[in-house]
Image (cartoon, rainbow, N blue to C red):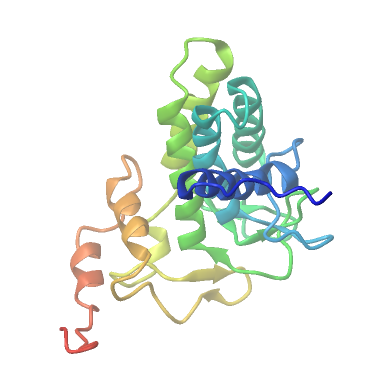
Amino acid sequence: MLRVEPRLSDEDLLDRFQGAAFGYFLETVNPENGLVADTSRPNWPASIAVVGFALSCYPVGVERGWMTRDAAVKLTLAALRFFWNSRQGNGDDVTGHKGFYYHFLDIRTGLRTWRCELSMVDTALLMAGVLVAGAYFTGDNDEETEVRELAEVLYRRVDWRWAQGSNSTLRQGWKPKSGFLRYGWEGYNEATMLYVLAMASPDKPASDDSYAGWTATYRWENIYGYD
């Protein structure tokens, strides 16, 4: 006899979708270094932005009962330790430079892959997740204390002023052989988080004119009769 499952309520259906979406991070993470694949395709590299999303979602997973707090701490620490200890520099076989990180990393070695750019906005997404972890794990045990300590030093290491080059706006990226990419982060977009983190940095903030320089690039448009 055909078994028909009862129709889920909108709330239950949304809960199922949310749990399945969260499961992506647990299915594609390398638990040794906390790196998370950019897609679920075989042999795909990790994306530092996706790691940032994962770090910000682990606390949600704990609160929703999708993972234990201990498991979340372990994955978080694996990622934070990796980024803190990974090699920085302007040569080959590195993970980042000036506190920033390359957009795509080999999920096993953590080294730059695809000759990708050192990404300012993806580093910002990573740092947002790092700071979420530091704010959420407030326990007084050694592991959660280490999470908070690593979160702070990772954020403090990012040299936002360097990422401006000779401009008021932050550059979109940088490559070791050719330097900064031609374009900067301009216009009203996801760069909001980038500039907030850059200006709030306690040690190496963006220049005082960075916000004005960014907002000066806003462009008004008329869409469906609305300005």
Residue 131: where, in percent of width, then height?
43, 38
Furthest residue in direction front, as rendered: 1
Seen in the picture, residue 214 relative to 23 is either above or below; the reply is below
Q: On the rendered structure, is 197 left or right of 152?
A: left
Asked whether 199 or 91 is in front, the reply is: 199
Given residues 29 and 77, the one toward you in this image is 29
Give the percent coordinates (x, y) of residue 98: 51, 52
Up-down relation of residue 186 to residue 48 (above or below) = below
Picture mark count: 0
Up-down: is 73 above or below 194?
Answer: above
**Is 165 on the left or on the right of 147, as rendered?**
left
**Which image quarter: residue 104?**
bottom right
Q: Is residue 52 visible?
A: no
Please name whichever residue, 47 or 64, is drawn nearer the observer in this view of the structure: 64
Q: Position of residue 18 (x, y in %)?
A: 55, 47
The answer to which quarter of the image holds residue 34 is top right
Which residue corresponds to the image point at 49% horizontal and 28% vertical from the top-left? 63
In the shown orientation, is residue 43 left or right of residue 115?
A: right
Quadrant location, the C terminus: bottom left
Name the residue at 57% across, 28% down: 65
Please name the residue shown 73% across and 54% down the image: 111
Q: Does residue 166 appear anywhere in the picture?
A: yes
- Identify whether 73 is placed above or below 129: above
| Image position, residue 176 (x, y; %) | 62, 68
